[in-house]
Image: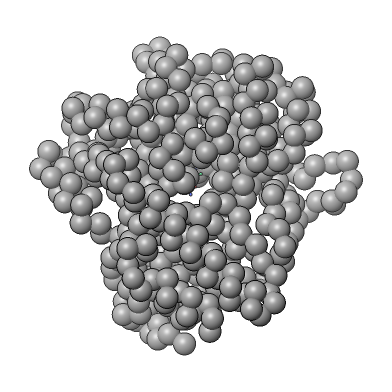
Amino acid sequence: QRNLSKSNAQFQRALKRLPLGVSSTFRYWGEDRTIYVARGKGGRTWDIDDNCYVDYRLGYGPAILGYADDRVDAAARKGMDVGGVFALSTERELIVADRIAKMVPAAELVRFSNSGTEAVMAALRLARAHTGRESYLLVEGGYHGLFDAAMWQADVEGWQEGGNTDPEVVPYGKGIPPTVRSLVHLTPMNDAQRLEDMFRRHGNDLAAMLIEPIQGNCCSIMANAEYVHLARELCTRYGVMLIIDEVKSGFRVGKGGIQGILGVTPDITTFAKAVANGYPIAIVAGREDVMRSFRYGGASHGGTYTAHSVSLAAADECLRILDETPALETLADYGERLKSGISSILNARGIVHSFSGHPSMFGLFFAPEPPDNYRAWKTSDYSFYDRMAHYLHDLGIICEPDSREPWFMCEAHGTDPTCLADTLRAVET
Ligand code: PMP
């Protein structure tokens, strides 16, 4: 059992000034388990009680190379010398945009934002400006950020499976106006028939279909290639913008993202997390004619902090490393070795399990097959996983506590000779 006395005391103090004692509701893990971090380096994090963890959360994915990467941080320091933000542009914007276009062919034109939420907001607006339509289609289980239009989900808990009706479409929590609901459609992942029905009924009214082909908020539920290709075909047929949200998967699962792996070309793509190894920057990119709707008299886009010189310098160096070195192979290979190490331990004890997603961001399930859509995921029993995750925290391994997010790998896990052995020793225990 770890000593968390300093974190526990910090929690009590923080509670007086910060709602739930944290700056993101998801960082609250309960009164006795909310951790305050002192620092991170490579694939490890130290909390203020000096517990050391092999960290598979990596800030929800951004630290693709590892925390405090010397190469990216040196570049970011040089970015400080440039001066931060101006009400003007800098030359490096084009350099970074060229890197992105080289790695992701669908990113013909590029605009910068600050967060995934902002990039998806801009993408949806762009789709509406380009099509002149308002409503949009989301895939159940996807997460696209904090803005009102994105925060709708299928109410699987209140639904009778097996009937003809779909789950109700409900907002994530309070404060989201019900009036937004009339513009939202939801469809289950990997269900071709329902997707076709949806387009038959609403295709001519849709501005966009938003899909996250590896659902990072549902333990990496994967879209199958046929489903994504069908989505592409239907979007083209009905004049709907296909937005692939690669905020988590982009520059992580491969240089060309999940769209490269699935062989599908979206009209618009969003990126964020891995772009700059954790410095705040995001991207909305896409087909030239669509992106040109960002103009006076077209779709409005901007932001005081967009293309900040520190984030941009970090992105330039991070993307260079991802493009020119084997960093992504190193971390995917580590993910494969970790998965097979976990499997050997579980198999030896006869524990049935399976993995979802990609080796760089995988989900672990205690079932013969991982779920392939949100309805199956939401109704599965993951109490065993949750218990295991809590044990692992005590043993110095950080993974998501409630089986929502996948395990994320970084390059430093692969180059640190102790991460794998330490993790497997904890799993064995
Ligand atoms: N889209 C996806 C696929 C995401 O995973 C996230 C963040 N988890 C977002 C959008 C929102 O990004 P941010 O938290 O940077 O606003």
333 in relation to 322, above or below: below
Which corner quadrant of the image does residue 38 belong to?
Answer: bottom left
Most foreground residue, 180 or 163: 163
Q: How is the rendered protein coloured?
A: one colour
Relative placement, left or right, of 93 versus 374 is left
Q: Residue at x 46, y 17 (%)?
A: 290
Toward which corner of the image does residue 240 lie, by quadrant? top right
Left/right of residue 67 with respect to residue 145 in the rendered view: left
> Where residue 242 appears, x then y in whole percent?
57, 27
Would residue 355 be seen by someone viewing this image from the given angle?
A: yes
| Residue shown at the point (64%, 78%) measured from the top left | 348
Q: Is residue 95 above or below residue 297?
A: below
Residue sitting nearer the eye, 150 or 259: 259
Residue 267: image location, x then y, percent: 51, 24
Above or below, comparing residue 67 to residue 46 in the picture: above
Image point 25% across, 57% down: which residue?
A: 69
Number of numbered discs present? 0
Q: Looking at the picture, does residue 80 appear above or below residue 57? A: above
Residue 20 position in % (x across, y down) = 46, 66
**At x 43% / y 47%, what residue is drawn?**
252
Residue 382 is situated, as x and y percent measured from the top left of the image, at: 67, 67
Q: Is residue 18 visible?
A: no
Most extreme residue toward the left is: 81
Q: Is residue 332 left or right of residue 220?
A: left
